[in-house]
Image: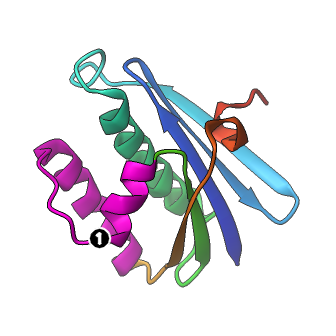
């Protein structure tokens, strides 16, 4: 199955949307206390990607060997996932490790695409 995955995060919240065929499932969460107002917006977006991906697998929307297009509204995130540039932020490196582990374990076929923030379905109301 093919999915399009959108996500967003800030100091207080994370959100994600998974589009499959003609359906869109949206979720949002308030940050757990250890992250709330303690991480940057970009770090929060990595949390949103990690949690949203894990959630999508857990509720059986995303299955083994599915293909996904992950929509990134931050060019730096695209660069992190598609190049071998050194990342100085240990928090981001740890989240990337977990995200890549989920992708590998589930044998997901992933493509990354940069979008404008106004195209991010995880930021639109339901």
**In the depicted view, which residue is nearer to us: 6 or 33?**
6
- 122 in relation to 59, above or below: above
Q: Residue at the spot x=23%, y=62% of the render? A: 97
Q: Residue 57: x and y, percent?
A: 51, 62
- Neighbor class of circle 1 (other Cα within 10 Å; few <14, some 14-19, many 20+) is few
Q: Secondary structure at mark 1?
A: helix
30 relative position to 61: left or right: left
Q: Residue 29: x and y, percent?
A: 50, 28
Which span of residues is magenta-colored?
A: 75-104
**In the depicted view, which residue is nearer to us: 52 or 44?**
44
69 relative position to 102: left or right: right
The quadrant of the rendering that contains the C terminus is top right
Q: Residue at the spot x=42%, y=25% of the render? A: 10
- 53 in relation to 101, above or below: above
* Residue 90 belongs to magenta span: yes
The quadrant of the rendering that contains the N terminus is bottom right
Q: Residue at the spot x=45%, y=51% of the render? A: 75
Q: Residue at the spot x=44%, y=84% of the render? A: 107
**In the depicted view, which residue is nearer to us: 20 or 92?**
92
Q: Which residue is mark 1?
A: 101
| Residue 54 occupies quadrant | bottom left
* Residue 108 belongs to magenta span: no
Q: Residue 46: x and y, percent?
A: 36, 45
Q: Residue 112: x and y, percent?
A: 52, 67
Magenta span: predominant SS is helix
Q: How is the image coloured?
A: rainbow
């Amino acid at each position: 199955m093919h999915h399009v995955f959108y996500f967003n995060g800030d100091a207080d919240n994370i959100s994600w949307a998974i589009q499959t065929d003609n359906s869109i499932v949206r979720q949002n969460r308030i940050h757990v206390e250890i992250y709330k107002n303690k991480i940057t917006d970009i770090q929060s977006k990595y949390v949103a990607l990690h949690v949203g991906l894990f959630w999508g697998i857990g509720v059986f929307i995303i299955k083994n060997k599915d293909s996904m297009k992950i929509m990134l509204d931050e060019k730096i995130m695209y660069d992190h996932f598609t190049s071998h540039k050194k990342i100085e932020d240990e928090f981001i490196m740890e989240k990337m490790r977990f995200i890549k582990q989920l992708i590998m374990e589930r044998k997901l076929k992933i493509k990354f695409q940069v979008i404008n923030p106004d195209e991010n379905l995880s930021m639109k109301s339901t």
